[in-house]
Image: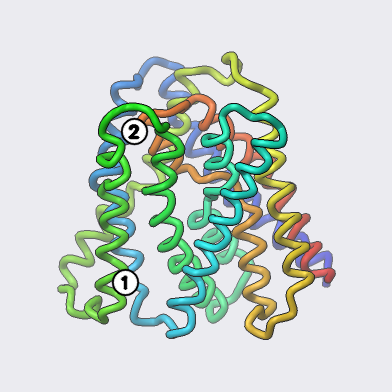
Amino acid sequence: MVSSIAWSSFWATVIAALQVICLSGVGYLLARTGRIDRVFLRKISNLLTDIFLPSFILYHTLSGSDNLRVEWVYLIPAVGIGMLVASLLLGFVIAKVLRIREANLFSALVSFQNCGYMPLIMVSVMFGPEKREMFYSWIFLYIIGFNFLVWSFGVWLVSGREGEGLWKKVINPPFLSTIVAVVLALLGLANSIPAGIYSFLEILSRPVLPLSMLVMGGILGLNCMSCSLNHRLLALTVITKLVVLPMIALMILSLLKFSILTPDLRWFILLESAVPSAVSLAVISESYGGDTPFISQVLFYTHLVSVVTIPVFLLLLKGQ
């Protein structure tokens, strides 16, 4: 039984990670062969943040709101925000102890995770229809809290404290679309939106994943995988994100005995703590300013290493 669970987790992780790596590989090859440049990537990033990501947020938040249980609507976003805040605080503590000068960037990369795409693929591979729908609902609810933080505080962390127009960076289309979507869902107005608008939003949401991967891979190609980087910081970020955080989550889950923490919720929480860094951080950095080459390398290596670490932690949870 344990063996089948381990293999299921492993292959689901491999499939999710390989899709991310292969899609970003297209951008990498296009950049290395000179077919795309930084100006092109900046324009794509602007399209993502101004049009496609807001459409993605609106569509997925509103389209699933009528099938949600009342307790999930409050519990899952609260869990997501709580996990992110705790991870951010831990990131700053680790940065302080290890004297990491890039504390803001480090904390953003270890805290904001690929909380949507990788879990969606893994759930689709590992579970049957009934449980899949439940986990899909949880994932989109989790993303609500994630979007609030990544497109506000995350933008501030990645783009830096300095410079004018910080509020313009923080109050951006994805952040505003999250507010609109949550308000409409809580007011029960999602069903009042015409089907044509949903279809339009769904079409506009489709390019989010491939274009995000294109930007990440293109940045890697333009800056080259062998460029001069802070390798110590890179290693610390990958280890903290994929080993330290899920290990702490596993320890806390083993100590908490609340009835609300069902086996499914425990599995979901551990998965969200173990997935790689968020691809949206590369889009934020390219659009609003930041150390995009370093962020892209962290994204590449966390997705690559997670093929091993995620199944290990899910198996450890099952053994408790």
Task: Please provide percent x and percent y for residue 24.
Answer: 48, 35
Please give left or right for residue 176 compared with residue 23 in the image: left
Q: Nearer the viewer, residue 252 or 303?
A: 252
* Crowdedness near tag 1: few (<14), some (14–19) or many (≥20) residues, C-alpha within 10 Å: some
Residue 137 shown left or right of residue 15 in the figure: left
- Residue, x 57% and y 49% (percent of image)? 88
Give the amino acid type for the residue marked by disc 1 in the picture. Answer: Ser
**What residue is drawn where x is 28% and y is 53%?**
54
Q: Position of residue 30 (x, y in %)?
A: 41, 24
Of residue 33 and residue 56, the one placed in the foreground of this image is 56
Q: Is residue 149 left or right of residue 196?
A: right
Q: Quadrant of residue 60?
A: bottom left
Task: Between residue 282 and residue 202, name the one nearer to us.
Answer: 282
For the residues carrying marks 1 and 2, which lies nearer the camera in this image? 2
- Assign a secondary structure to mark 2: helix
Q: Give me the disc on residue 52.
A: none
Q: Which residue is mark 2?
A: 288
Judging from the image, the colouring scheme is rainbow
Badge 1 or badge 2: first in the primary sequence: 1
Q: Are marks 1 and 2 in contact (CB under 8 Å)?
A: no
> Which label is found at residue 63?
1
Q: Nearer the viewer, residue 170 or 279?
A: 170
The residue lying at 38 percent from left, 15 percent from top is 34
Image vertical order of residue 152 relative to residue 214, above or below: below
Check the image and report above or below for 270 versus 157. Answer: below
Three-letter code for the amino acid on which mark 2 is drawn: Tyr
Q: How many discs mark residues in the rendered view? A: 2
